[in-house]
Amino acid sequence: RIDWDKAYIVLGLSDTRAINEVSSLNWNGNEIGYSPGTKVTEILSHGFHASLEGLNAETEQHVFNTKVSINGSQGFRFAPFGENTTVNMKSSWPHPSFQGMTLPNNYEVTADGFTSSWTIPHLARNYPQSWVYADQNYHLGEFTAGVDLFEPVFLYSKVTRAVKYGILFVGLTFLTFLIFELTTQTRLHYVQYGLIGVALTLFYLVLLSIAEHTAFLTAYIIAAISNIGLITIYTGAALKNWTRAGVIFVLLSALYTVLYSLLQLEDYALLMGTMLLLFVLMVLMYVTRNLRVNSSDFTLS
């Protein structure tokens, strides 16, 4: 026997500390206040409920709505209780990661945010539409759908990713100087190589220190211009040839442009990095195609 006079509606939350504001329940045009607790803690451990006193069981359809404002979180999940559950979600966050038992039927992600919609039939879940509470309890948290809101690349993550390309950048720069030595009679001292390497390494420290106080793009531009200018001027003075210094300027400008592009990519960073390595290898093979061994020295003829 169902005691309709003791019926109540429950809204469960994973953590009630996230509640900011809750309006009253509008049930068939009547305002009903909520009370703390779910009264079904084995199923929904946290939340609140509203008693539906005088519920008319003969009414075939009931209309209700409520508004809940909760503090920000890293994600949002919902459990599909209805025989056919339809959920429409809209957010200004541009980096959603859809999670749970099913992905949205339709979604659109842009730089201004995302919209998504789920339509979930009751057959897709592992608990019935209704059951006797005392006989069996179900873990509703195992059958949820929703979205995680994440920041794909943080400041320190970007700097860390940039550092991972450091060996490649130092190596390419040194190879350029080596080619200069092979094609001309100019030689750099080991100390000069070391100072250029220190300058290349210092770029990442300058980037991090400035990025902590301003936008990452601004910090990147300042660090890149400072580093490129320093190495270009030093190269021109060391080689006594500003044409070769101009080549270094173009090379470093291209490398730092490519590096920034790699840092902005989320799905194709590995592909673009691999293509960069292949391109560099092609250039090196072309430049060194006439390399010959003369005595103990390597020269280009």
Image (spheres, rainbow, N blue to C red):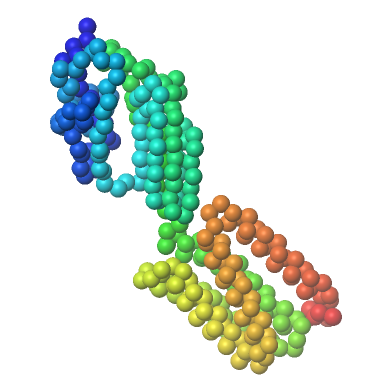
Question: Where is residue 116 drawn, in percent x and y?
Answer: 44, 40
Q: Is residue 138 above or below residue 90?
A: above
Asked whether 183 or 295 is in front, the reply is 183
Q: Which image quarter holds the N terminus? A: top left
Asked whether, in this view, residue 227 is left or right of residue 175, the answer is left
- Seen at 57% across and 70% down, the residue is 257
Residue at 54%, 57% in the rendered image: 265
Q: Splitting the image into 4 quarters, where does residue 79 fall?
A: top left
- Please state if 245 lies on the left or on the right of 116 as rendered: right
In the visual, does 23 lie left or right of 190? left
Q: Is residue 127 visible?
A: yes
| Residue ranking furthest to the top | 1
Image spot of residue 196 (x, y percent)? 57, 80
Q: In the image, 9: left or right of 295?
A: left
The quarter of the displayed image where residue 84 is located: top left
Q: Is residue 253 above or below residue 275?
A: below
Question: Residue 168 placed where, x, y %?
Answer: 61, 67
Image vertical order of residue 85 relative to residue 217, above or below: above
Asked whether the viewer can see residue 174, the reply is no
The quarter of the image holding the C terminus is: bottom right
Q: Tell me residue 273's x, y (percent).
A: 62, 60
Quick check: 31 above or below 177?
A: above
Q: Residue at x 44, y 23 (%)?
A: 121
Viewer-side residue, 142 vs 281: 142
Camera-nearest residue between 128 and 107: 107
Number of callouts in the render?
0
Q: Choose between 8 and 280: the one closer to the eye.
A: 8
